[in-house]
Image (tube, rainbow, N blue to C red):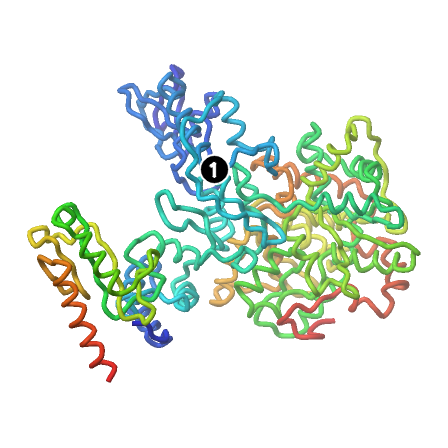
Amino acid sequence: MTKGVMTIDGVTVEIGEERNVLELIRKTGVELPTFCYHSELSIYGGCRMCIVEDDRGGLIPSCSEEPRDGLVIKTNTQRLRRYRRNILELLLANHCRDCTVCGRSGACRLQDLARSFNIANIRFINTALNPKTDLSSKCVSKDLNKCILCGDCVRVCNEIQQVGAIDFANRGSKMRVSTSFDAPISESSCVGCGQCAAVCPTGAIIVKNDISDVWRELDKKDTLVTVQVAPAVRVALGQAFGLADGENSMGLIVAALRRLGFDRVFDTATAADLTVREESREFAQSLLSLRSMPLFTSCCPAWINFVEKHYPQLTPHVSTCRSPMQMFASVIGEEYKNCGQRHVHVAVMPCTAKKFEAAREEFKTNGEPNVHYVLTTQELIQMIQQAGVIWEDLEAEGVDTPFSVLSGAGVIFGVTGGVTEAVLRELADDRSSTGLKKIAFVGVRGQEGLKEAKVTVGGRELAIAVVSGLGNARNLIKELLKGSRKYDFVEVMACPGGCVCGAGQPVASLPHRAARGQGLYAADRLSSVKRSEENPLMAILYNGVLKDRAHELLHVHYPGHEAGSSI
Amino acid sequence: MSQELSAQLLDEIIGAHQNSPSAVIAILQDIQERYHYIPKAAFAPLAHRVGVSEASIYSVVTFYENFSLEPKGRFIFKVCDGTACHVRKSTPILERLRKELSLASDEVTTADLNFTVETVSCLGACGLAPVLTVNDKVYPAMTPSKVSTLLAELKEELSHETN
């Protein structure tokens, strides 16, 4: 049975599963302007840009109207254009209009719409209260002079991530997005996942930018600058240079980094192999003892922050493994500590929370951070553009020795389920290639927020859960604490979809997310080494720099971790 | 009147509303009735018990004019400044009160936490204009001199309370 038909701008459209008129309008090939509508968030109906006119002259906000049979609407009339212009003009009235010095310039929806609606003159005076920018967080900054109160950040923080660090405070002309008691973001319950910055349509919340510091290091003559690139970066960065989302451009990224002046370029996937080895060992050991809670993964820094700020009682159940970025930083630091030059290490990450992780006391050696600077994918794109490197002219290059070998297991770390799959490859009894395929289809792949799998290892059936998105993690934790679910191993990535959808990446819509994950699985298929333990570099490292020092260099004890609780 | 927040009392208030997130406003009202304001220390336990973020509770508290994050005085004056009271000269009453209590322009509560002076838009008693209330007791047809007398009486009452 059909749900009927609607007439949109004279075109008859059949109503399908669309949850609102706005999505049905998209089906007719029209993209209405919106600020506050995101298909994954609840409907707010605040910005009013998506209003349409019905056949009686009534105005309907299309995002909050259910499609119904017989509805006749127009989406582009003289009156609607006037109203949309008025809304834009009112939003711009109190808005900081220093576009050229805004971190979001060129990628700002308000700027885009102001241009396409040809807003040339603002008739209203600016009555903004001119609040100070909150620069307290290592990950994001908040400038309320650029906030249009669409509430996207509030809803992503409360609905998708369930972190609840921000909400609206006050009302009317004094309304603003605020933490509890307007505390600096760094002192709030914020975990630095950056999803607020990813959904912000303007420059009100932006990711911290460390480009100028990195340029300064690259300019220094007596400094050796090494860089590692996370798996997820390679399937998203190319998007800015005309490649399809999901297309692997690691070779070109390596070439670009060398052109920018980095002395050595490495692939974080190499260190992911170390993580797999250490984490598998820790997992196998944890199975020997009776545990009330599963072993949680520890690669994701926003997840670590979430545990520390929201569920500190779970800290002892989080793996003591450092993240691949930090494991690599330890090993690289050892390699170059006697290189005769000052050594600076930079990491290119899809992530905003990594900026916080890099600054943590736990990851400093003699007071110096092991990772001096974290650049997001977006920042690297900007550096490539600043330097004028012509992407099309680049030719793919390989990473540097001595860390040039990696396994497919390390590459898939960037997608939700990847860490689990890599650990399972390590632990599985079946060492054949059919065994590998079986693991791939056990249920750990895919974009769902919660995936469950049962695998038999050494005659024992293990229950595994893979979660992405902190809201899903919170729901799972609640059930674990109630005792209504039980697992042996839980992988958590803070961003929905995993690192490929991190807040440091170019923004991706739902289909693009899947494409990025597929890109990493494709890279895995092309790799000749599938299991981390088969990476020949591992033996060299474990017999070399890591000999008797694996625990010191590859593990971490956050406050609450019992020293020596594992391995 | 400001007092140390009692964890037990807070527990009772939240428990009386079955820890329900939909009862946040009612819980906040009960807390305010007891303490005359919402103490900051109440936020974390309240957020934890009802499963609503502290930022969201802050959002509710700052949305409603009626909730206060500042400690209030032992006596709370609500001077009506609705249309009827305003035209019957409520402003001089308010000015007299603020002057006698030496309140600075951005202050509503005296430093000793004895008096709070607020305006309200209408008390719904326009026939008694100009009207004010002190801790919900209504004082009709006020004048600046009557308010001075009232203030003196209340100060007298306070001196007995503290003795």
- Give neighbour class at mark 1: few <14, some 14-19, many 20+ (Cα, 10 Å): few
Q: Secondary structure at mark 1?
A: loop
The residue at the point 63 percent across, 65 percent down is: A318
Q: Is residue B161 left or right of residue A318?
A: left
- Quarter of the image where the C terminus of chain A is located: bottom right
Label 1 is placed on what type of residue? Ser
Q: Nearer the viewer, residue B117 or A552?
A: B117
Q: Position of residue A531 (x, y in %)?
A: 79, 52
Q: In what quadrant of the picture does the N terminus of chain A appear?
A: top left
Asked if residue B126 can be seen in this view, the reply is: yes
Q: How many marks?
A: 1
> Which residue is depicted at the point 71% across and 57% down?
A323
Residue A454 at x, y = what percent? 61, 57
Q: Taking A353 as reference, is B109 left or right?
A: left
Q: Residue furthest left?
A: B127
Kindly tell me whether residue A453 is visible in this rendering: no
Q: Residue A555 appears at what percent x and percent y?
A: 74, 66
Q: Quadrant of residue A398?
A: top right
Q: Position of residue A83 (x, y in %)?
A: 37, 24
Q: Residue furthest bottom?
A: B163
Question: For residue A384, what is the image quadrant?
Answer: top right
- Which residue shows up at 66% across the image and 39% down it? A516
Q: Is residue A247 above or below residue A317?
A: above
Q: Which residue has dot 1 on it?
A: A39
Instruction: Name the subunit of mark 1.
Output: A
